[in-house]
């Protein structure tokens, strides 16, 4: 069964004043399927439409035309609250509070309070191995640690689907590897979460994902199994560059 | 868990954020502005020497100028606090990119605004007490008149009016994606032209009309009349206007802010930085 099914999705933004075009097509007839319990990596250069797609699925911006189904049900605003969302430009943590206090606050935003909040937070501290830093103020955290806390925040309401937009954009290679292992081993394999991940990290995307989807200029160019790259001689990087060059030369 | 219990528990958590933040700020301010207290002492000495027992005309009555000024400043600062709360909330939520995330949760931005207003009014009340205590110690302003129950109704109405103006301003900022300095402008205009420092009767005729569009201009005559135990029937029209302003601004404010939030959500503007 598909966790996310997107059919002919189009998103047109109003063009800025004095621009030659009347509208800018951020997504153009995109069709994408993400199976339940899998990791799908969205690849593509900057401006390809990855973030727009994630933001539409998060319910932060509306789409222009097309159809989205989540777990076989039509896409609704209330449904997006059941997803865990981590946006690329989003910090959204109170720096003057500890990680624990932050999680309590975000639990309250999710209507989880009292004992159930305490229990949930304890579970997440254990799951993400945050015991050593959770009682420290967030301002003392490294970027990797903050990202871990943000990921824990997305898990507070126990979502089935995680939408992650460049979650490792500012992390060093070791922190990136650790973060990806967390996604694959704990969230995907153990907890069976479906993950849609927009990333520029090709090697890691190939390693942790089940499916790779390539977006370029708002179009979904291809959607392939990650296994096909693991077994092939052609690397994902070569495929990526070739695709961009081929389309640019058209 | 029923709705009220959940709301109270959530409110406690939301208020704790303000507590942690302001505890930090208070410590920073206390160390930074210790010298300011000494400056206040010197200033108060000259202020008292120059203005004590100078009288100012208030309708058919006379009032001590320091009493006139301190009552105006104290009450204006208090009722203007919702403006600062909305300014601060909007800037903070957008600054830490919290606004967008908030929309992905079942909580409404209104819950946060309510907790912020509650916290803001608590702080403003504490500030008011400190202000009056300082006025008593430094200038000798009597505190007893400020304990009259009659002060509450006009103060609450003016407070609601400025909460409404705060919501209107926030809504406009969300629509236009600029105008964050509007809060400060309204605050300063209210202090400058609302009859805090001088009686509005001293202003030129056209400026008086503009001044009477501010809730604080209607609040202060009532407050001062009550403080000097004068007959308030001549200022009761101000109470009526204040009540109408509170109602109108609150209703328009709720509609505009709600529409602004929807608009910003529809267009994905929450993460944009505010400009002047």
Image (cartoon, rainbow, N blue to C red):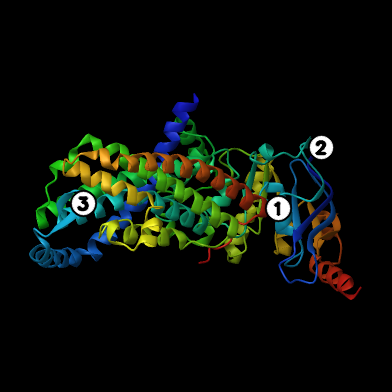
- Give how far across and how far down residue B147 sits, in percent: 18, 39
Q: Which residue is mark 1?
A: A54
Q: Which residue is pictured at 19% across the width and 48% down the height?
A: B60
Write down the residue under mark 2. Answer: A1
Q: Disc 2 versus disc 3: distance between alpha carbons?
A: 78 Å
Residue B274 appears anywhere in the view: yes
Using the rendered image of the protein, determine whether residue B14 is visible from the camera's viewpoint. Answer: no
Q: Residues within 10 Å of mark 3 (few under 14, many from 20)?
A: some
Mark 1 neighbour class, 10 Å CA radius: few under 14, some 14 to 19, many 20 or more: many
User: Which sits in the foreground, A129 or B55?
Assistant: B55
Q: B217 or A43: which is nearer to us?
A: B217
| Mark 2: few/some/many CA within 10 Å (<14, 14-19, 20+) | few
> Mark 1 falls within which chain?
A
Q: Is residue B56 above or below residue A243?
A: above
Nearest to N terminus: mark 1 or mark 2: 2
Q: Chain of mark 2?
A: A
x and y, in percent, of residue A11 in the image:
78, 55
Task: Give the foreground label among 1 and 3.
Answer: 3
Say whether mark 3 and mark 1 are on the same chain: no
Q: How many marks?
A: 3
Label 1 to label 2: alpha-carbon separation: 20 Å
| Residue that mark 3 sits on | B58
Of badges 1 and 2, the one in the foreground is: 1
Left or right relative to A209: residue B183: left
From the viewer's side, name the closer residue of A248 and B151: B151
Q: Which residue occupies 49% across, 27% down?
A: B3
Residue lying farthest to the right in this orientation: A250
Q: Secondary structure under badge 1? A: helix
Closest to the camera, between mark 2 and mark 3, is 3
Q: Residue at x 25, y 60 (%)?
A: B197
């Amino acid at each position: 069964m598909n966790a996310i099914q997107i059919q002919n999705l189009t998103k047109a933004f109003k063009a800025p004043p004095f621009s030659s075009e009347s509208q800018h097509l951020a997504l153009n007839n995109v069709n994408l399927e993400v199976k339940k319990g899998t990791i799908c990596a969205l690849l593509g250069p900057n401006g390809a439409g990855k973030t727009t797609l994630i933001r539409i699925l998060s319910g932060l911006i509306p789409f222009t035309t097309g159809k989205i189904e989540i777990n076989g049900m039509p896409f609704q605003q209330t449904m997006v609250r059941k997803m865990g969302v981590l946006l690329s430009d989003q910090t959204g943590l109170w720096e003057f509070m500890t990680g624990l206090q932050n999680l309590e606050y975000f639990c309250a935003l999710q209507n989880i309070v009292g004992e159930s909040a305490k229990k949930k937070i304890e579970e997440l501290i254990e799951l993400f191995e945050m015991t050593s830093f959770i009682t420290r103020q967030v301002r003392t955290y490294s970027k990797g640690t903050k990202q871990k806390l943000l990921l824990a925040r997305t898990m507070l309401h126990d979502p089935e689907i995680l939408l992650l937009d460049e979650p490792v954009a500012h992390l060093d290679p070791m922190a990136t590897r650790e973060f990806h292992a967390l996604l694959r081993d704990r969230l995907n394999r153990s907890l069976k979460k479906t993950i849609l991940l927009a990333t520029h990290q090709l090697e890691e995307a190939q390693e942790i994902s089940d499916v790779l989807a390539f977006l370029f200029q708002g179009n979904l160019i291809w959607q392939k199994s990650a296994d096909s790259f693991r077994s092939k001689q052609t690397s994902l990087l070569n495929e990526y560059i070739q695709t961009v060059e081929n389309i640019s030369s058209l | 868990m029923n709705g009220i219990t959940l709301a109270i528990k959530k409110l406690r958590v939301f208020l704790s954020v303000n507590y942690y933040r302001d505890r930090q700020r208070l410590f920073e301010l206390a160390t930074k502005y210790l010298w300011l207290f000494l400056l206040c002492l010197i200033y108060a000495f000259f202020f008292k020497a120059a203005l004590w027992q100078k009288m100012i005309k208030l309708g058919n009555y006379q009032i001590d100028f320091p009493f006139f000024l301190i009552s105006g400043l104290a009450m204006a600062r208090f009722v203007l606090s919702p403006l600062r709360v909305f300014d601060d909330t909007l800037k903070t939520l957008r600054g830490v990119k919290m606004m967008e995330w908030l929309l992905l949760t079942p909580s409404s931005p209104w819950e946060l605004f309510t907790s912020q207003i509650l916290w803001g009014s608590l702080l403003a009340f504490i500030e008011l007490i400190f202000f009056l205590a300082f006025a008593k110690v430094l200038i000798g302003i009597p505190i007893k008149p400020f304990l009259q129950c009659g002060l509450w109704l006009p103060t609450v109405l003016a407070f609601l009016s400025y909460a409404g103006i705060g919501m209107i301003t926030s809504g406009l900022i969300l629509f236009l994606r600029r105008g964050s300095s509007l809060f400060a402008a309204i605050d300063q205009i209210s202090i400058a032209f609302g009859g805090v420092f001088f009686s509005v009767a001293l202003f030129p005729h056209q400026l008086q009309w503009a001044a009477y569009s501010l809730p604080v201009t209607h609040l202060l005559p009532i407050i001062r009349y009550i403080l000097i135990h004068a007959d308030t029937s001549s200022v009761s029209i101000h109470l009526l206007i204040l009540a109408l302003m509170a109602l109108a601004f609150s209703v328009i404010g709720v509609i505009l802010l709600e529409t602004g939030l929807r608009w910003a959500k529809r267009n994905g503007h929450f993460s944009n930085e505010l400009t002047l």
